[in-house]
Image: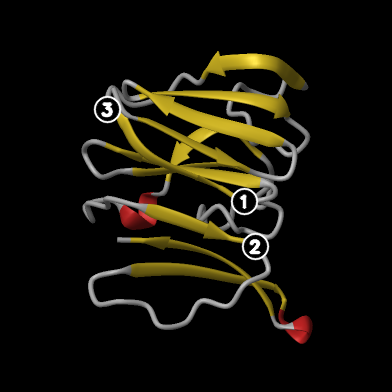
Amino acid sequence: MQMQVTTGRYHTLLVHNSSVYSCGSNLCGVLGHGQDTTQCAAFSRINFPSLSHVIHISASHNHAAFITLSGEVFTCGDNSSFCCGHGEVGRTIFKPSRIEALKGIPCKQVYLHHHSKCTNVLPNEYVVVHTPHFQHREISCIIVS
């Protein structure tokens, strides 16, 4: 029984036995429980739109990412600057949604970075980069391998 824990600004995510749990503030939709949930004081299981089991998670300040056993990438959270990888959907993603641009590309890990530069990407890694504050050289990106 392996467990993974990661934290964002006001939330914590946990994977245990291929299920994901979250707690904290849902200010930006990062808890993955829908827009009616404002906060969770205790860990609550996130329901995924896929039957696949989650094997890896990552959290940033205002968004979260999940990799399933089949290699699909799901994200949720603040997508106002398109940093969840869902293209033209410039609104909050309140439940984990699959990144369609990565469909058919099996991924094993995902890393979310907030205000960091994405350089020195290794071969066979795919990068989804968003630059909300380019004038300040702040970059938010998703790296999947």
Mark 3 residue crowding within 10 angstroms, few (<14) / some (14–19) / many (20+): some
Give the alpha-carbon distance from disc 1 to disc 3, as whole Å: 23 Å
Q: Earlier in the sequence, mark 1 or mark 3?
A: 3
**Nearer-the-camera pick, 100 or 111:** 111
**Nearer-the-camera pick, 140 or 89:** 140
SS state under label 2: loop
Residue 17 appears in view: yes
Residue beneath label 1, please?
A: 60
Quadrant into which the N terminus falls: top left
Mark 2 residue crowding within 10 angstroms, few (<14) / some (14–19) / many (20+): some
Q: Are marks 2 and 1 in contact (CB under 8 Å)?
A: yes
The structure residue drawn at horizontal position 71% and vertical position 81%, both measured from the top left corner, is 134
Is 134 left, or right, of 66 in this rendering? right
Q: Earlier in the sequence, mark 2 or mark 1?
A: 1
The structure residue drawn at horizontal position 27% and vertical position 52%, both measured from the top left corner, is 107
In the rendered image, residue 56, in percent from the top left (x then y), is placed at 37, 41
Disc sitting over residue 52 in the figure = 3
In the rendered image, residue 96, in percent from the top left (x then y), is placed at 50, 34
Q: Earlier in the sequence, mark 2 or mark 3?
A: 3
Is 60 left, or right, of 38 in this rendering? left
Quadrant into which the C terminus falls: bottom left
Residue type pointed to by label 1: Ser
Tell me if residue 10 comes above or below residue 113 in the rendering.
above
Disc sitting over residue 114 in the figure = 2
Residue type pointed to by label 2: His
